[in-house]
Image (cartoon, grey):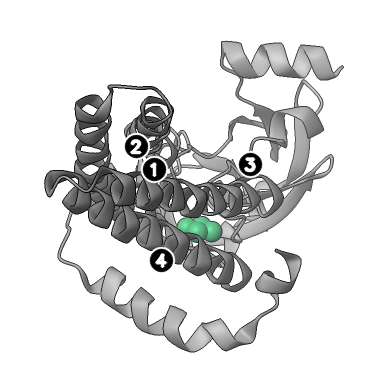
Amino acid sequence: MDRLERNAGLDGIADSVRRVVRGLPLGRGRDVLHGRWLGHPVHPLMVQLPVGSWFSAAVLDLLPGQLRGARALIGVGLAAAGPAAVAGWVDWAELQRQQMRVGLVHAAANITAVALYSGSLAARIRGRSGLGKALGFAGLSAVSLGGALGGHLAYRQAAGANHSEVVPHLVTLGWHEIGAVADFPVGQAVRRHIDDVTVLVVRESGNKVHVLADRCSHMGGPLTEGVIADGCVQCPWHGSVFRLADGWNVRGPATAPQPAFDTRITDGHVEACLRLDETRAGKTTDAA
Ligand code: FES
């Protein structure tokens, strides 16, 4: 799998497929497929149905007299595979180069599985149950390989993970001075550090100051290099939009909001304090 990450021979086809996926007229549906409404990618959830159905069909194939049940489960798996694949492709089109290479082979393994299960279903419908079972087990092998590659993508390469999750563990509680008010020109992004966390600072007219963690929750892109407009910042890497006031991810592909800080001005200096919801407060206390 590590060699796969380094295989530049996959880049030509990856670029072509990415152009097609990014060109799909999905509108707001793209964020739905990313899982912004859920708070994390929806693709891993959607693959449970085809994988579970196909695995269950394999169990039935090992038992006597279960041909009809196995055939129905394979059909259910095939029907569910399409939507899961679309969500996966939409996520894939916003990954980094090394992740795209692994993701391409992950998809190829799953497409092979769909082809094998289609053949399996066709064979079963024609009454050739022996061939249907053989193709089904071959399909299960292919989708298992796809699953292993998906695990590498998620856990080794952190595709789909929240890249700002660590922030509450790195910032000490309380107020931190980050500079004089005059250091922050109105409407411009300024980079500062609070403990080990890089932050984006934007001052609005009227001395309202916004501070967000700088590393984008999607893939770690630098928000200080993004575009500031309409009370939001747009990530320069894949275009996620975060509200400056509270870090809310207004637009994907980011599925997690950006850690935000409360701010105040004391004696002409800006101070920031990590805004904690209950979950984050618990995490910080645990880390301490
Ligand atoms: S890193 Fe992908 S949108 Fe920010």
Q: Residues within 10 Å of mark 3 (few under 14, many from 20)?
A: many
Residue in front for this viewpoint, 287 or 207: 287
Q: Residue 31: where, in percent of width, then height? A: 29, 47
Query: Closer to us: mark 4 or mark 2?
Result: 2
Residue identified by numbered label 3: 164
**What quarter of the picture does the N terminus occupy?**
bottom right
**Disc marking residue 93:** 4
Query: Closer to us: mark 1 or mark 3?
Result: 1
Mark 4 and mark 3 in contact (Cβ < 8 Å)? no
Q: Amino acid at mark 4?
A: Ala
Query: Closer to us: mark 3 or mark 4?
Result: 4
Circle count: 4
Q: Could you tell which of marks 4 and 2 lies nearer the N-terminus?
A: 2
Q: Amino acid at mark 3?
A: Ser
Q: Residues within 10 Å of mark 4 (few under 14, many from 20)?
A: many
Task: State how far apart marks 2 and 3 are (Cα).
Answer: 24 Å
Q: Amino acid at mark 1?
A: His
Mark 2 and mark 1 in contact (Cβ < 8 Å)? yes
Residue identified by numbered label 2: 46
**What quarter of the picture does the C terminus occupy?**
top right
Task: State how far apart marks 1 and 3 are (Cα).
Answer: 20 Å
Name the residue at 36% across, 25% down: 60
Using the image, determine if residue 87 lies above or below residue 1: above
Q: Residue 283: where, in percent of width, then height? A: 72, 17
SS for dot 4: loop
SS for dot 3: loop
Task: State how far apart marks 1 and 2 are (Cα).
Answer: 5 Å
